Image (tube, coloured by chain):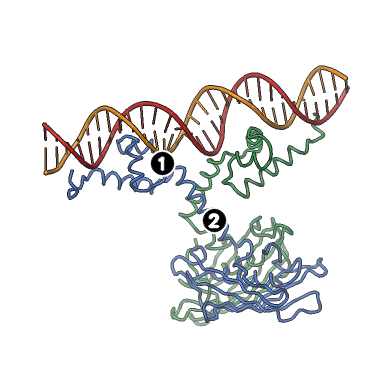
Chain colours: A green, B blue, C orange, D red
DNA sequence: TCAGATATTATCACCAGGTACTAATTTCAG
DNA sequence: CTGAAATTAGTACCTGGTGATAATATCTGA
């Protein structure tokens, strides 16, 4: 066999293998050999070529990751990395659109992720123990795609007398282009009793 | 030995064992036998008495838990279970507020999860290959708490001539109480080129 | 068509981290 | 001292592999 012409079946099988394992990391070689109709040795050779560890190692890795993650948890505390924050004034956050945020078929980000970034930032920028989103008026200006980096900028527009509501505007950009804008009304803790929002301002680092 | 008087050493050892395993679930019996200065068989008898599974099972359980969490938590596929869907007319989805969705301190759900359920439903109810959220006007009427079951109902209000935009209203309830309402403008695929939204209509079951 | 490379399959020995079972030994309390 | 509980020991066996070696199959270019 010469380098230039690829033996397709092997490549295909290895792709399938990767996919199967990605879909169900708890699958053992025995099962794979039955599913793919090749010997268990071939499965193992394939795994080696692909650098996929054995079942036990995979499971252990997942457990370790979750053990670390569970301790720090904040996978979804704040969406996006806040890189600048002037409380009660403005804030900036960055959010990378990755595989898990898009529709696999089109690579377009689901709207609620873009919203989540903006919402998190709007809440974070309010300098209160508890801040909750009361309402929002949002516009998706263009679709955001896999791999794009969303930069959200929030500006506190009004901050009525230290209580009740604050208005926050958020603009999200990909490069120079605005892709999203939102006007948020954020409830501040203040009275504390009659909170009506759906988000708060805890745990930001 | 009589029932009434406890042999302390055993109890103590088992407590230590539990503690050690809780602190580091990745510890094998060999290590434990060295640490506790008893034979490996004793360690195993202790584990049995305490109902603590073997290392591999422990690790697998952790991995599975995190795997489920990763699958269910993410702002990923469609948020909420769609239990009724009349395309271009209406739809209902259910979404349980769990640990992952709330601020741990207050048990109040983050706004973007509530939004995500409504957004997913609004997009799903539109009978098009590709449907994207163009804009939305939303209101969080009261905060939703851990353990509450959100029932979102979507109604397609206008559906301008098979192309361009559709208006969808979504109301989310906990029991009788309305907790969220949103007015969504959804772009339908139609031309397909000039999509502007942030969400689409794939992968609903 | 045939040699040589590549791919696949088949064995065999071995490993960790156990389970399950039996049996011997130790400990200790009454 | 005796008998029960506790501990230790040893064996066979399990899963889900690794690693090495060898045989067989398949393709491929010249």
Looking at the image, residue A186 sits to the left or right of residue A112; the answer is: left
Above or below A76: residue B109: below
Chain ID, mark 1: B
Instruction: Please tell me which residue lies in front, A45 or D3.
Output: D3
Instruction: Please tell me which residue lies in front, B55 or C11.
Output: C11
Spatial CA span between label 1 and label 2: 24 Å
Looking at the image, residue A60 sits to the left or right of residue A37; the answer is: left
* Residue B199: x %, y % from top left: 69, 66
The N terminus of chain A lies in which quarter of the figure?
Answer: top right
Task: Mark 1 vs mark 2: tell me if same chain.
Answer: yes
- Name the element at disc 1: loop
* Residue B205: x %, y % from top left: 67, 64
Instruction: Please tell me which residue lies in front, B52 or A169.
Output: B52
Q: Which residue is mark 1?
A: B27
Q: Which residue is mark 2?
A: B68
Residue at image coords 49%, 60%? A205
Residue B205's tag is none
Chain ID, mark 2: B
Looking at the image, residue B7 sits to the left or right of residue B86; the answer is: left
Circle 2 packing at 10 Å, graded few (<14), some (14-19), many (20+), is few
Circle 1 packing at 10 Å, graded few (<14), some (14-19), many (20+), is some
Above or below B63: residue B204: below
- Name the element at disc 2: helix
């Amino acid at each position: 066999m010469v380098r230039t012409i690829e033996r397709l079946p092997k490549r295909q099988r290895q792709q399938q293998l990767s996919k199967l394992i990605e879909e169900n990391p708890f699958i053992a070689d025995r099962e794979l050999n039955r599913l793919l109709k090749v010997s268990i040795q071939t499965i193992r050779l394939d795994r080696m070529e692909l650098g996929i560890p054995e079942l036990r190692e995979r499971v252990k890795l997942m457990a370790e990751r979750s053990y670390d993650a569970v301790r720090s948890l904040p996978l979804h505390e704040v969406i996006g990395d806040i890189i600048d924050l002037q409380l009660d004034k403005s804030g900036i956050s960055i959010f990378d659109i990755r595989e898990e945020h898009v529709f696999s078929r089109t690579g377009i980000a689901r709207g609620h992720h873009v919203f989540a970034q903006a919402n998190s930032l709007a809440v974070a920028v309010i300098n209160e123990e508890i801040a909750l989103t009361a309402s929002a008026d949002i516009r998706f200006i263009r679709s955001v795609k896999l791999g794009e980096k969303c930069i959200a900028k929030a500006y506190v527009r009004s901050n009525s007398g230290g209580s009740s509501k604050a208005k926050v505007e958020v603009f999200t950009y990909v490069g120079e282009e605005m892709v999203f804008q939102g006007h948020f009304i954020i409830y501040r803790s203040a009275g504390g009793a009659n909170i009506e929002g759906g988000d708060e301002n805890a745990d930001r680092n």
